[in-house]
Amino acid sequence: MYVFTSAMFFLLFFSFFQAKESERSNPAEPASREKREKLIIYLEQKLQKDSTDTEVKNNLLWLKDTSRVVTNMDIAKMDDASNGLLKISKSDYNSFREYDSAQKLLPSNKRDGWMARLLVKREIELNDKFRADPDGAMHNFTESILHKLPYLLFISLPVFALLLKLVYLRRKQFFYADHGVFTIHLYVFTFLVFLLIFSAGKIGTAIGRDLDLVVFVLFMLLYFYLYKAMRNFYGQRRAKTILKFLLISFFSLIMFSILLLLFLLFSVFTF
């Protein structure tokens, strides 16, 4: 049952959230009027702050000249507000050599650690690779994240079972396997509810109506189900179950936050 529900969930999930090829832009094609006008507004605002910036002035003249063909690649080069695909560090360097030179000028105790250097290097690599085609890069990156999502959910399953084991540590009659079975049933119900949430989002888009209330009710249904499932499965009184429900909710939030961060880092370095 769990395998079947998981398979159906991810099949429908990828159908709902597959990145659209039509939204990608060819770097060599002429930029849309909307992109052109948006960049003009941004550059005019930038020029108001610094009227001596000749590069911005030249770019504005180029963009406002309707006889010139401005490509998506031209837009990407002029738009320093979105220069690059990702921003995963606090650095603002165009090359790793530039970053490395700046680091060598700092005292040894002020330099970035190995993890920060690794992030900066990866960020520069990705931005150099996809700067000319940010739309295509974002499409590929989104696809990469979506197809790695099952790993996050399957890794979280035994960790969530471990949280239950710790919360019910005094209940010796329940082994880790029992908590695992409980978690599997909970995940099956979660998958079904998320399918309803995705469906509500698609229906709302199709009919042009806001179904946020329906989505909110479905999310609350998940928490209500968790409480009732804990109460029925572990057989404790209402007060104890509510306390442990709050503990599980709090620690699972921390757990998913950590796993999500690791998952995003994994996606960045394997993209």
Image: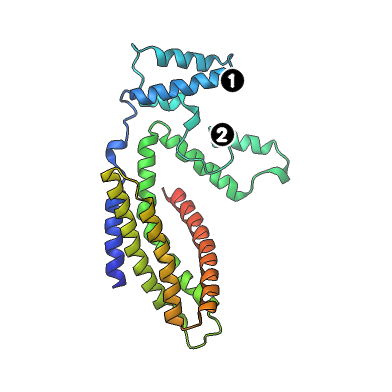
Q: Please name which of the two marks, 2 or 1, marks the residue nearer to the observer.
A: 1
Residue 75 or 48: which is nearer the viewer? Answer: 48
> What element does badge 2 sit on?
loop
Q: Where is residue 25 shown, x and y percent of the image?
A: 32, 32
Q: Amino acid at mark 1?
A: Lys
Tell me the quarter of the picture where residue 117 sits: top right
> What element does badge 1 sit on?
helix
Left or right: residue 83 compared with residue 111: left
Q: Residue at x 32, y 36 (%)?
A: 24
- Residue at numbered disc 1: 49
Q: Residue at x 47, y 70 (%)?
A: 160
- Residue at numbered disc 2: 93
- Mark yes or no: residue 233 visible: yes
Q: Amino acid at mark 2?
A: Tyr
Task: Determine crowd level at label 1: few under 14, some 14-19, many 20+ residues with C-alpha closer than 10 A.
Answer: few
Q: Residue at x 43, y 33 (%)?
A: 131
Left or right: residue 47 compared with residue 85: right
Residue 177 or 92: which is nearer the viewer? Answer: 177
Q: Where is residue 66 shown, x and y percent of the image?
A: 35, 13
- Mark yes or no: residue 177 visible: no
Closer to the chain start, of discs 2 and 1, is 1
Residue 201 or 266: which is nearer the viewer? Answer: 201
